[in-house]
Amino acid sequence: MEKRTKTLLMVLTVSVCLLAILAVALSIRAINTANKRPTLEQIYIQSHDIEFAKDISFAGEKVPLEMFNIRERYERELLSNCYFHSNTMLLVKRSKRWFPVIEPILAKYRIPDDFKYLCVIESMLTNAVSPSGAVGFWQFMESTGKDFGLEINKDVDMRYNVELETEAACKYFLQAHKKFHNWTLVAAAFNAGTNRVERFMREQKVSSYYDMLMADETERYVFRILALKTILENPEHYGIYVSKNLEYQPFKYNTIVITESVDNWTDFAKEQGITYKLLKVFNPWLRSNKLKIKDGETYEIKIPTKPFNITAAYSQEALGEDDYAEIENDSLCRDSIPDMETEEDECDEELEDN
């Protein structure tokens, strides 16, 4: 028994020694292999502070950057968006398509041009749909949309109509400006609601947005507007370069006025030489596959023209599969285009107290 134990211990000792020798040999081999590899320079990711002008304004109203917390809050949003390159570049591209649509409507209602940047931060210039029910470029809730004259039912939802929702937003701005006589407060109210902003002013005994303590979202709201205004006005200065030929061009289309009910939008689209999908991309406010029109009602339908009416079948036939012509429609989000069998989507946060 004792002899067997000694034998086992000897075998175990020899095994451990062999494993140790093997480990040393493998380590030496690994070191030699590593030494033969080329030395790579360390890659450094550099970030820089961003210099900005001392005089910044919103809708002609001066931003008090001499206040330390105001300057830091603005800088936070500027840095955040400058270093969010992919997102900011998309906004530059989309703005080339949608600002020409929004700007004339703001001018029509005599709303300062800077308010187009509210639309940017509300929806990133897409027909966005939020979990709490707000819809479209300006993120109106259903009740608020109806209050400001937008038709919303199972067949149509004019919150998806950029032109009409922009007009509704302008009506909101004018109503709020009558109350506050200050455009910066109007912008804050678009986020928090007019009654809430009024309560903050009354309770805190202040009259400026920049002196109020509010919920974090509302405290950041105007500064996000200011940051994106700063960048989109001069994107190259902040390292955002978009080739002219890659900007998203404004949509081209003809308008048809319809006065009779449509039983099937797919058949209607085929009659116009386009697909059902293209019809919905250009008219995302159509929320079902039919439309019942009452006597005296009219609707304007956009029918895309070249190059926006190109379909996959056409491009493959005309250009060949290897030269497929793709038209960028990213600014209309997928959620805004329902399936043929579905009704309206549910969507974003309510504009309170309207």
Image: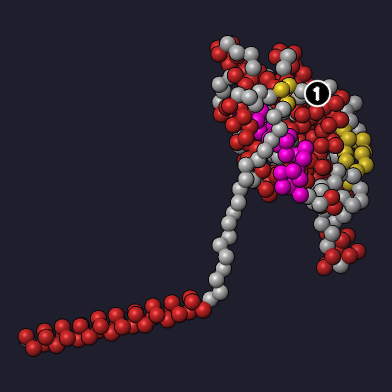
Q: Which residues are magenta?
A: 218-241
**54 part of magenta stretch:** no
Towards the viewer: 88 or 140: 88
- Percent position (x, y) of residue 80? 62, 41
Above or below — where is 244 with respect to 189? below
**235 part of magenta stretch:** yes
| Residue 352 seen in this snapshot | no
Residue drawn at x 90%, y 44% is 252
| Residue 70 seen in this snapshot | yes
Residue drawn at x 20%, y 86% is 11
Mark 1 sits on what residue? Answer: 111
Residue drawn at x 62%, y 45% is 48
* Label 1 element class: loop
The secondary structure making up most of the magenta span is helix
Above or below — where is 59 with respect to 40? above
Mark 1 burial class by Cα count in 10 Å: few <14, some 14-19, many 20+ = many
Towards the viewer: 174 or 281: 174
Q: Is residue 287 left or right of residue 13?
A: right
Q: Is residue 279 left or right of residue 201?
A: right
- Percent position (x, y) of residue 243? 81, 52
Residue drawn at x 60%, y 13% is 206
Above or below — where is 37 with respect to 280? below
| Quadrant assignment for the N terminus | bottom left
- Percent position (x, y) of residue 287? 75, 39
- Percent position (x, y) of residue 332? 76, 44
| Quadrant assignment for the C terminus | top right
Q: Is residue 158 left or right of residue 37?
A: right
* Amino acid on which the number 1 mark rests in the picture: Ile
Q: How many marks?
A: 1
